């Protein structure tokens, strides 16, 4: 696996970890307050987590099929999502 693909996998994995922690937090808030907003955030984070887990799996399983020219874009997408999730986590916690 190329270095840029490994970077994309690392960021997608970190995204999954952040999303898991957000799901737990939103779940706790929803259990205490029964607020539909928290439930909606939890559902959104769950689907984004599923997308990230599918991304990690596809990057690892299908890495040989990606052209080297696509690697920087895949890494950038995962890195930008990571920054966005960090901001969301910072605001939430």
Image (spheres, helix red, strand yellow):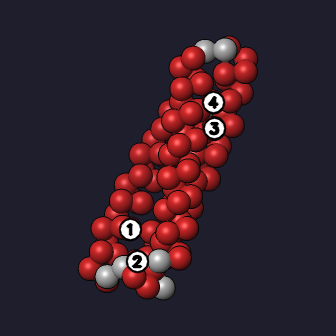
Earlier sequence position, callout 1 versus callout 4: 4
Earlier sequence position, callout 1 versus callout 3: 3
Q: Distance of mark 1 from mark 3, alpha carbons? A: 24 Å
Earlier sequence position, callout 2 versus callout 3: 2
Q: Is residue 26 visible?
A: yes
Q: Distance of mark 2 from mark 1, alpha carbons? A: 6 Å
Q: Residue at x 58, y 46 (%)?
A: 19
15 left or right of 5 in image:
right
Q: What residue sits right under mark 1 in the picture?
A: 75
Crowding near the residue tagged with mark 1, few <14, some 14–19, many ≥20 C-alpha atoms within 10 Å: many
Q: Which mark is residue 26?
A: 4
Q: Is residue 90 visible?
A: no
Q: For numbered disc 2, what is the local secondary structure?
A: helix
Crowding near the residue tagged with mark 3, few <14, some 14–19, many ≥20 C-alpha atoms within 10 Å: many
Q: Which mark is residue 4?
A: 2
Q: For numbered disc 4, what is the local secondary structure?
A: helix
Q: For numbered disc 1, what is the local secondary structure?
A: helix
6 left or right of 67 in image:
right
Looking at the image, residue 65 lies above or below residue 76: below
Residue 49 placed where, x, y %? 56, 49
Looking at the image, residue 45 lies above or below residue 62: above
Q: Are marks 4 and 2 in contact (CB under 8 Å)?
A: no
Q: Are marks 2 and 1 in contact (CB under 8 Å)?
A: yes
Q: Which mark is residue 23?
A: 3
Q: For numbered disc 3, what is the local secondary structure?
A: helix
Query: Which residue is the extreme one toward the left?
Result: 69
Q: Residue at x 37, y 55 (%)?
A: 80
């Amino acid at each position: 696996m190329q270095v840029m693909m490994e970077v994309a996998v690392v960021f997608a994995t970190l995204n999954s970890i952040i999303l898991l922690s957000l799901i737990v937090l939103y779940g706790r808030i929803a259990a205490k307050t029964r607020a539909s907003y928290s439930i909606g955030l939890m559902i959104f984070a769950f689907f984004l987590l599923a997308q990230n887990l599918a991304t990690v799996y596809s990057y690892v399983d299908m890495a040989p099929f990606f052209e080297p020219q696509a690697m920087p874009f895949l890494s950038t997408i995962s890195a930008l999502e990571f920054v966005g999730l960090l901001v969301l986590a910072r605001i939430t916690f």
